[in-house]
Amino acid sequence: MLAETKFAAEPLARPALGEPYLLTPGPLTTAYSVKQAMLRDWGSWDGDFRAMTSDMRRRLLALTGDMKDEFDCVPMQGSGSFCVEAMLGSFVPKDGKVLVLANGAYGLRAAQTMPYLGRAYTLIDKGDYLPPRGDEVAAALEADPAITHVIAIHCETSSGILNPVAEIAEAVYAKGRKLLVDSMSAFGAIPLDVNEIRYEAMVSSANKCIEGVPGFGFIIARKSELEAAKGRSHSLSLDVHAQWAHLNRTGQWRYTPPTHVVAAFLEALRQHEAEGGVTGRGARYTRNRDVMVAGMRDLGFETLLKDRWLSPIIVTFFNPAHANFAFDRFYDLMKDKGFIIYPGKLTAVDSFRVGCIGQMDEHVMRRVVEAAAFSLHEMGVDTAAPPAAAIAERAKLAA
């Protein structure tokens, strides 16, 4: 049973331009004030923009709980995958070896990155349904002394599973290795406090739980690791040490920054703080999930994951077994009603995903459920129950 969270009394404003809600793991629906922040031009070398960059880095570091000044924040142009590659290429020595923990597309993408970097790696692949666990990590590290680093996905959005990062961190450091965290879709709504969970570096992106727009990501890392990263990178533009050193020396990004995106992100950070920071943002997303999942289950939909592993970021549902159900038609009908959902990424069964993040609240999620009910009716689908094979597959893999 999903936990009850505080009822949201005042609905959030609807998209001012009338665009559909993005029920995705990012890009996502943003506040109008965040969009408005992009209407002004900024000089990338100007002191005002350098002050914006400094303020942004300070605010992001505050979200980690770093009270000892052991970490620093390095923004990096590009998408989240750019930052993951930058992190791996900068913090893993050229003679290092990475244990990649995968239970979906983004763990597998990290593994796909390793040959490009010329770094050795090994893989634990848990498929679509299951999280990597601490005892599995400990066993893999015990069996292979060459492994120097482990990379874990905080929230695997191909399934919506929230991975047990604290448990993984304990196993990693008990064996004397180092942890890197891809917290792309979780940071800002799910705690990743450095006083509670040990890691050397983590990455996230502007267009996720902080509710900014796409254009850059950021690496938060121990200063000792940033110093050690000098000369390691395989790439000129993705060299985290070089970006960090240049920022600290000049206050400027090495290459043209996404100025408008940074301005929007600062506004999003101010709104994040006003909402109550990680705790407040996470509570709203959790309520979004609880209301939406309960309503969808009432229609007959089944979630891929049991409640224990459901994240407040995005939820995967099995496609209905009904002969009249076609995802493309369902997608179009939902979009006509103002909601853009997300195709599934599972390998074994057909599915789709509904995001819980962005400028949405439980009132919106109730409308999402109503739209799904009307869409099923228009398709002539009288039950959203999945095929028996989907439930059997889930039971088999979760056993």
Image (cartoon, grey):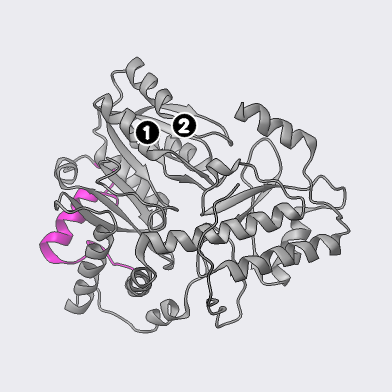
> Which residue is depicted at the point 61% across and 80% down?
18
Give the extent of the magenta segment.
233-258
Q: Label 2: state its secondary structure.
A: loop
Q: Earlier in the sequence, mark 1 or mark 2?
A: 2
Image-quadrant location for residue 33: bottom left
Q: Amino acid at mark 1?
A: Ile
- 35 or 132: nearer the eye? 132
Side of 333 where 66 appears, left or right: left
Q: How many numbered discs sit on the rendered protein? A: 2
| Residue at 46% across, 31% down | 132
Q: Nearer the viewer, residue 141 or 274?
A: 274
Q: In the rendered view, tell whether residue 230 sits above or below residue 189.
A: above
Q: Which mark is residue 132?
A: 2
Q: Residues within 10 Å of mark 2 (few under 14, many from 20)?
A: many
Does 36 sit above or below residue 218?
Answer: below
Q: Is residue 26 visible?
A: no
Looking at the rendered structure, the secondary structure element under dot 1 is helix
